[in-house]
Image (cartoon, coloured by chain):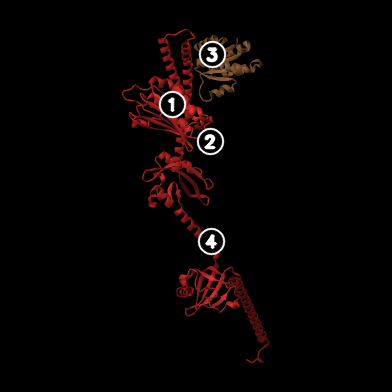
Chain colours: A brown, B red
């Protein structure tokens, strides 16, 4: 069973993610702040990380950079799932070290397929 | 008494008297010799004076013959005494006429007729080598015992240099005065802020006549006493010849209009004291207006940029804030509709479908707004590739298929097999979807046709419907943002009001355009015309 870390501060969106991913058979670990995301990535060594960008403490880009600092996590797929959908937002996310970029609102029918794709490419 | 009769005493007496007489005569002789000597000496002195004097001393007769010329004069004119004496003045030291045209022989006559009037005169003379010189003469008439003019004694001083300097000065004055009156620059000389002289340009510039200004103060040029005093203070304080002051002021012309003027002042010196101030004006009204205009334009541009920045920030934050709740609305309705939480009955499916539809519409609105802001900011990167138009048209058809089926419309696609275009696939599809969905939206019965063809370097995609058509007065609004076409008797169609505006902008970016034709009640035709191959210069980064 793949371990997946979801960094998301919005309660409803977290619930949505957890529901979808658990249904699909993932072991889901939840982080509601950036700091928690960095800590849990270090501790749990997930197979893939779903990253929100706007977070209450440090933003998802900074969280990604911190996670990438660690040797064990410098290759883990980090997929930004974000409401930042303006021109240049995707580039910013990828420049910070994310592997992929999915715009919110997510398409529940295709999300799981995309996650599979990133896991396979790992 | 005879000699023999004379006594010895008488002889002695005679001898004594004779001796006395001799002595007396000797004294007289000595006196005479002394007097003669003195005369000789005095004559000698006088001669030396005449000969050596640093002036020309000339004696000439009534009929113009030279009788004497001193050494200085001989040297000056270039003749020896022997050469010059006895010759007529005209042709030797006097030219036949002055360069100014005055007849000198007749002048000689005049001098003799009325010597008192010519005690002093200046005239042009001539050296032996032909060089003309100017000499100031003092003339003295020597009369004979009968009271007739015997000779004229003339003493002359060479003033050629002085005369030339004077002429040069005159020329300079003439030059200055010509310049003063003809330069297209306002100049005036003032003393204690009273006009002493003023040139034509100045007068014309302020609309005055020269006589209206001379002797007057410059106060009339100023709007207020305070301004008059300020300029006075700044322009004249501690002014000396080397310092040229520049002061800017708004000066009033006679007609009451104001001009922006740069005043430049320099002191006019006469020895150590001031003879006034020269003030030169430069009209900078137009330059200032241009500067102000430029300034305003810059402020305007800054404002526009600021508004643009605010707008973009607003759109970005609106997009972000709406996406977050939409994520759970669309996500959960998706989950429910997929049956992941259990079976739904038909009514539940229908209503959830409506929720999802509305949420999707809201999302489309957000996406269109973002697209518009991207397009307007020129922030769209084009991905140019060669692709088959048929595939793109079919994909577009698929995205409106549900609506076509719901309305039971017919859709026909007609284009040559394998028709290709080199452009941005995604953007071309976006435009075709927009044109198709508009056609579906406004057509209740009949047929929608999509045709495509290549004509030389152009690709034309034509979308024809049999819908309600567009009123002539609405046709201009078609491609404007947030303009919605109102069809009388029908509810307002769902839409963002950005579709055609955006499509037209994108078409422009692809180097093409969209045109529309329509007839009320018969339907509309929208033609997308694109270059077969996009030119490098229309690729936006």
Q: Chain of mark 3?
A: A
When the figure is inspected, residue B266 is found, relative to residue B47, above or below; the finding is above
Q: Residue at x 60, y 78 (%)?
A: B82
Q: Residue at x 38, y 43 (%)?
A: B257
Question: Could you tell me which secondary element the residue under label 3 belongs to?
Answer: loop
Say which label, 4 or 1, has the lower sequence index: 4
| Mark 3 burial class by Cα count in 10 Å: few <14, some 14-19, many 20+ | many
Q: Nearer the viewer, mark 3 or mark 1?
A: 1
Q: Chain of mark 4?
A: B
Question: Could you tell me which secondary element the residue under label 4 belongs to?
Answer: helix
- Kindly identify which numbered label has been placed on residue A8: 3
Q: Nearer the viewer, mark 2 or mark 1?
A: 1
Question: Could you tell me which secondary element the residue under label 1 belongs to?
Answer: helix
- Kindly identify which numbered label has been placed on residue B434: 1
- Along the line of sight, which residue is nearer the eye, B538 or B286? B538
* A52 sits to left or right of B284: right
Q: Chain of mark 2?
A: B
Q: Which residue is mark 2?
A: B536
Say which label, 4 or 2, has the lower sequence index: 4
């Amino acid at each position: 069973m793949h371990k997946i870390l979801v960094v998301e501060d919005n309660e409803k969106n977290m619930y949505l993610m957890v529901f979808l991913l658990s249904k699909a058979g993932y072991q889901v670990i939840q982080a509601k702040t950036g700091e928690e995301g960095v800590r849990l990535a270090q501790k749990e060594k997930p197979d893939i990380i779903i990253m929100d960008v706007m977070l209450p403490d440090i933003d998802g880009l900074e969280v990604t950079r911190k996670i990438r600092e660690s040797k064990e996590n410098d290759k883990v797929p980090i997929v930004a799932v974000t409401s930042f959908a303006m021109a240049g937002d995707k580039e910013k996310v990828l420049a910070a070290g994310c592997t992929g970029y999915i715009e919110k609102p997510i398409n529940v029918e295709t999300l799981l397929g995309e996650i599979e794709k990133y896991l396979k490419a790992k | 008494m005879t000699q023999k009769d004379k006594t010895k005493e008488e002889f002695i007496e005679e001898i004594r008297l004779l001796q006395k007489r001799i002595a007396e005569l000797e004294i007289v002789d000595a006196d005479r010799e002394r007097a003669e000597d003195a005369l000789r000496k005095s004559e000698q002195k006088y001669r030396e004076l005449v000969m050596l004097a640093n002036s020309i001393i000339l004696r000439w007769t009534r009929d113009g013959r030279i009788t004497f010329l001193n050494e200085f004069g001989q040297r000056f004119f270039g003749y020896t005494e022997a050469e010059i004496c006895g010759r007529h003045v005209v042709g030797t030291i006097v030219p036949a006429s002055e360069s100014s045209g005055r007849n000198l022989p007749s002048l000689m006559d005049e001098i003799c007729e009325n010597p008192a009037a010519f005690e002093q005169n200046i005239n042009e003379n001539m050296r032996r080598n032909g060089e003309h010189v100017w000499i100031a003469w003092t003339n003295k008439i020597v009369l004979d015992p009968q009271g007739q003019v015997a000779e004229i004694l003339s003493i002359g001083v060479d003033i050629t240099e002085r005369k030339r300097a004077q002429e040069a000065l005159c020329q300079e004055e003439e030059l200055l005065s010509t310049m003063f009156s003809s330069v297209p620059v306002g100049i005036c000389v003032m003393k204690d802020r009273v006009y002493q002289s003023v040139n034509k340009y100045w007068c014309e510039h302020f609309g005055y006549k020269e006589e209206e200004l001379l002797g007057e103060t410059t106060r009339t040029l100023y709007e207020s006493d305070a301004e008059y005093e300020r300029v006075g203070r700044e322009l004249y304080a501690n002014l000396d010849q080397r310092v040229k002051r520049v002061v800017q002021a708004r000066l009033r012309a006679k007609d009451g209009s104001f001009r922006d003027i740069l005043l430049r002042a320099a002191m006019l010196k006469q020895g150590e004291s001031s003879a006034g101030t020269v003030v030169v004006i430069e009209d900078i009204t137009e330059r200032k207006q241009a500067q102000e205009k430029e300034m305003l334009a810059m402020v305007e541009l800054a404002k526009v940029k600021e508004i643009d920045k605010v707008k973009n920030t607003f759109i970005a934050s609106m997009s972000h804030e709406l996406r977050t709740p939409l994520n759970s609305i669309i996500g959960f309705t998706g989950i429910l509709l997929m049956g992941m939480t259990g079976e739904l009955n038909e009514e539940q499916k229908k209503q959830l479908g409506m929720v999802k539809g509305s949420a999707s519409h809201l999302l489309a609105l957000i996406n269109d707004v973002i697209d518009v802001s991207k397009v307007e900011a020129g922030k769209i990167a084009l991905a140019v590739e060669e692709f088959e138009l048929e595939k793109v048209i079919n994909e577009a058809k698929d995205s409106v298929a549900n609506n076509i089926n719901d309305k039971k419309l017919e859709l026909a696609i007609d284009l040559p097999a394998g028709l290709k275009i080199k452009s941005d696939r995604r953007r071309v599809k976006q435009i075709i979807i927009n044109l198709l969905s508009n056609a579906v939206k406004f057509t209740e019965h009949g047929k929608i046709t999509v045709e495509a063809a290549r004509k030389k370097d152009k690709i034309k995609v034509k979308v024809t419907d049999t819908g309600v058509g567009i009123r002539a007065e609405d046709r201009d609004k078609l491609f404007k943002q947030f303009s919605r076409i109102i069809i009388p008797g029908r509810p307002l169609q769902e839409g963002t009001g950005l579709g055609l505006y955006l499509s037209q902008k994108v078409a422009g970016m692809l180097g093409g355009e969209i045109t529309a034709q329509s007839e009320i009640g018969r339907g509309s035709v929208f033609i997308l015309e694109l270059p077969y191959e996009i030119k490098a210069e229309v690729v936006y980064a």
